[in-house]
Image (cartoon, coloured by chain):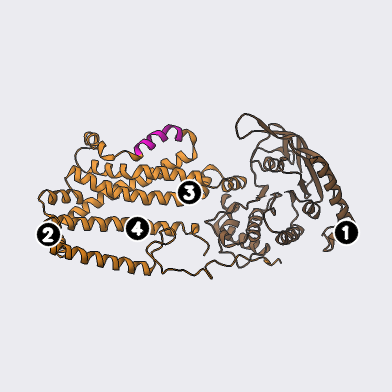
Chain colours: A orange, B brown
Amino acid sequence: MISPREHADPPPGIGEGRLLPRTLADAQGRDIPIGDARHAFFALLVGGAVWEIAGRTLQYSFLPPLSNVLRAALRLIASGQILGYLAASLVSLAIGYGLAAAGGVLLGLLMGRYHIVEYVVEPYVGALLTAPKLVFVPILYAFLGIGRGTQVAVVFLSAFFVIVINTMAGIRSVDASWIEMARAFGAKERQLLWKVLLPGALPLIMAGLRLGMGRAVKGMIRGEMFIALFGMGALLRKYGSRFDSESVFAILLVVVALALICSYAVQLVERRLTSWTEPRP
Amino acid sequence: MIELRDCGKTFPSQNGRARVVALKGMDLTVRAQEFVCLLGPSGCGKTTLLKTIAGLLSVDEGEVCIDGRPVTGPGPDRAMVFQDFALLPWANVVTNVAFGLELRSVPRAIREQRARELIDAVGLAGFELHYPRQLSGGMQQRVGLARALAVDPKILLMDEPFGSVDAQTRRLLQEDLMGLLERTRKTVIFVTHSMDEAVRLGDRVVLMTPRPGRVHDTFDVELPRPRPPDLDKHPRFAELKEQLWQQLRAMQR
């Protein structure tokens, strides 16, 4: 029997003393250790206090103190308005983002793997990636009517293209030696796709899904403010037009919290799936 | 038996205009269970030759046959060990070693059992659940070797497998490879640019000329097997290395 006589390198980290205590962003902005959560809480506390004091002393009608905003939030929640509109928003977000994720990964995969697809589709994806999506709303009205369909389409368009581009780049980034190895061991195209290309592209696909989530939430609010029928954006517009700044701020807080939760959820999945890309443990 | 008859392979070069003739008029016959080392200066088409036998590349001229049948693509009778290891970074050692069997739809329990046997055989017991990035270069290539042996090929194709590890590790890997092959004889084609390694491992050393690559000369090693521990003191060992060096030097002048 043969024994391993060469050894793996010792793990790094020993002797690499940190000069500063852990601050908000780690090396890649991924980890949020306990210390950072405490920092964030402290920052929120300070910000809240400044807001409260500024609101009370300045007495501007468009800068209500935090306590009034929180009271307005409670009032809106109690009346059921926030929950109803929030549910409407989340349904659009879930359907639009779900379609964008599935379709975006599929199209990106085809573009990354087959040059002919890339040549045909790339100019359109490139152009639409940066185009504002609200310009399509009048056209969408014609096809999908004024309502849920158009709202879902706006969310979809907002998230779709960045997911496509990232997936394509991810497939391209897969190490040629892994593909050659798999072929040498007899991999068929379908096996190559599932067992090498998709796992290899996963870090960039997940980055695309994370960026796409941010864009989806933005697109959702913009679309709702534009269409002004349902969802948090519509609610925001309703109270905005009444110059009810307390309610506007209350809705704003809910929207920001929603965006944070959504992007954190994607990050959680990302970290679980792509832990192999992190530096040596 | 592997037979190459008058093989030629031409690549378009990087800028797309000039063409690189990687192989031209290449003839080679490798007997079953023979260990052949392909030696030659860099860029002499050694790797191209290996890939045509693996079925990853097709020849433009001539014919590559295994046991009388022409090679049309990769097959279960061959397995390859790569210079850069080509391990999947998201998979642990067991999954990497079992990868060839996974592609052949061998049930999980059976392929992992087989993988564990080979991990043990290459001396990596205890590292089953480690990931490639947690292993040294030498250990990674042990995984690569175990992966190739796991599919139990008749022919082992090795492309400068020990080229990127340090000298001591290289000697250990060479010894362990010889030990493994004593137990399960295979036909081996081993690409190297080390004269020492070629003579140490091979039954026969095939010296290739650069651009276009073809056989310059072949040498029967005629050293006892299993190779004695004091091989370096063997007169035939020194003599062969000297012969190879003279030829290589003449070729590059």
Per the image, the residue denoted by label 2 is A79
Residue drawn where x is 31% and y is 48% of the image: A215
Dot 1 alpha-carbon crowd within 10 angstroms: few under 14, some 14 to 19, many 20 or more:
few
Q: CA distance from mark 2 to mark 4?
A: 28 Å
Residue B89 to residue B25: above or below: below
Most foreground residue, A240 or B5: A240
Which-is-in-front pick, marks 1 and 2?
Answer: 1
**Amino acid type, callout 2:** Ser
Mark 4 belongs to chain: A
The reply to whether the C-beta atoms of the residues labelled 4 and 3 are less than 8 Å apart is no
Q: Position of residue A228 (x, y in %)?
A: 17, 45
Using residue A281 as the reference point, say whether residue A212 is left or right of it: left
State the extent of the magenta-drawn residues as a range: A117-128
Q: Position of residue A8 (x, y in %)?
A: 61, 65
Q: Position of residue A165 (x, y in %)?
A: 41, 42
As helix, strand or loop, the secondary structure at mark 1 comes to: loop
As helix, strand or loop, the secondary structure at mark 2 comes to: loop
| Discs 1 and 3 carry the same chain letter | no
Q: Is residue A127 magenta?
A: yes
- Give the overall secondary structure of the magenta segment: helix
The disc placed on residue A201 is: 3
The reply to whether the C-beta atoms of the residues labelled 4 and 1 are less than 8 Å apart is no
Q: CA distance from mark 1 to mark 3?
A: 52 Å
**Amino acid type, callout 1:** His
The disc placed on residue A265 is: 4
The image quadrant where one finds the N terminus of chain A is: bottom right
**Amino acid type, callout 3:** Ala
The reply to whether the C-beta atoms of the residues labelled 2 and 4 are less than 8 Å apart is no
